[in-house]
Structures are given as structure tokens and as C-alpha cells.
Amino acid sequence: MHLERNSFLAITCLTALFSPPTLASTKIDLQWSICDTDAETVLRKLGEEGKTPYKAYPITYYDTYPPIYTPAGLGFRTKFKHHDPGYLISLIKARFGAETDNVPPEADCVWDQYGNTSYYTCGLPSIVATANETGELWSPTQKAFAERYQHIDWDALVPYGPFMNPKWKLKILGHKGVFDDVVASSLHLMEIEISVKKKKGDKVHKKITKYLQDRGVVICEPQLPKTLRLFERLGYEDRWGMGKVVSEQVVLAH
């Protein structure tokens, strides 16, 4: 039996993974891509030296080799959740340039902002494994979600990782946030994320950007999600363009 449909634990946990869809238009996740040498350096600059992560589990990204889907606005990954090494989920995300209703009701959506660019990002998780059961990497519902926007060669997806992904809780100028570091060999793909009301997003973003700069935190230029930065460092930059969104003009009929 498929875990996503038949496990009460799966349904309960998946419900908690994202904010309710009704919040998507009122909330925005402000993101800062950080290009310091390592997490310890960033924590020291923020006055959090020696702070231990509240969780640290591996994450694996998936794409073709070389990658074609992530640069086009579709992301595939697996990661552990809820402090349980035996609890693994897969997640597919689609990134849009504007708010859209062209998503299935099962998807959860939120605004993301990197630098001055905002994306409307919708994700669909599925349970892959618990301590007692193992399912398919990508559920039928997830596959249908991704193929709304682009034909996917599922057999061609290969893992990039796993990479350890420690996370620290922060509070910056009164705003609760998370600092995380995807450690890909000697490369540290770091981000700070703070969720605020969308109408306050620009003001908070400017205020916290100045705070980080005043403390010498190195903010990446350009500001890009971790997966695009990873593929850039692997040598796949500019040949396909960075930070694209999925095109609603290529939605496939079912």
C-alpha cells in the first residue's frame, strides 16, 4: 500500500510540513544566500559563536546529468524530517514568476524572495520511508504535479548528494529565522530564512540586509537558491540561465 494514502502518520506529518495554502498570498519567506567560508564564520559575525544546530540531517537533490529541470524551475529532493533518522520524505517544487492557481489542491504554496526577486513556489511532499515501511521515491501524485509543467524522464534523475544540512534557529532584529548550511564537500551552501507578512517584506528585507552587511556577513551576488548555486559551482552556469521559472504555457494535458 502506498504510504502517502495509507499511513495515518504520513498524513499527519505531511500536513505539518508546509503552511496552509490560505497563507500563501499573505506570507513571504525572505531568503539571503550567504557566501562566507563556513557556518562558524557566519555565526561568529552574528554573535552566535559556538551555537549548536537544532537539527542536522542529510539532504539529496535530484536532476539529470547535466541538470535540466532545476534551472527550468522544477526541483526534486529527499530529506529527513521531525528529528527521526528513519523518516524520509521526497519533495517536488515548482517555481513561478507570479501567483497562480495552476497547481493541484494537494500542493502548498508560499512566496520566496532572493535579493529583489520574488518567486511563487509550490511544493508537494510524499513519505518515502519510515522505520517500518519503504515506498517509491516519487509518488503518482508528485509525478502528475511535475508533469503539469514539463515532461519528466524519471529514470534519468540522478542524486546529487547526500549532503549534511545542519540548521540553527536565529532571532534577528526581533524576527525569528533559520540559518542552514548544505555542506557539499568543501562548499558551504548557506542561507538565512525569515518568514514575515508579505506587505512588510520589502521593509524587513532592507532592514535585515543592512544588519547583515554591517556585521560583515558576505551576501552572495547574485542571490540564488542553493541548488542553482551548487550546479553553478559544478560548472553548469549560464549555459541554461539561472533562476528561471516554470512556464505555464507548456502545461501538459492529462
Image: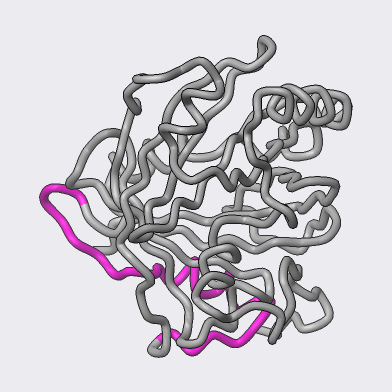
Q: Nearer the viewer, residue 198 or 183?
A: 183
Counting from the top left corner in percent of width and height, residue 48 is at 46, 17
Q: Residue at x 75, y 68 (%)?
A: 245
- Majority secondary structure of the magenta segment? loop
User: Residue 233 placed where, x, y %?
Assistant: 53, 70
Of 188 and 59, nearer the camera is 188
In the image as oriented, which residue stretches furthest toward the left? 132
Residue 57 seen by the camera: yes
Q: Tell me where residue 28 appears, x and y as whole percent.
A: 74, 36
What residue is at 57 percent from the left and 15 percent from the top?
Answer: 171
Q: Which quadrant of the figure has residue 156?
A: bottom left
Quarter of the rendering occupied by the C terminus: bottom right
Image-quadrant location for residue 197: top right
Q: Is residue 22 left or right of residue 79?
A: right
Residue at 47% x, 77% y is: 63
Q: Is residue 175 above or below residue 179?
A: above
Instruction: Determine the residue located farthest toward the top in the rendered image.
Output: 174
Where residue 160 sits: x, y (%)?
A: 38, 71
- Residue at figure coordinates x 26%, y 34% from the top left: 83
Q: For the magenta stretch, what is the residue range? A: 130-154
Placement of the N terminus among the 4 image quadrants: bottom left
Relative to 32, say whether 236 is above or below: below
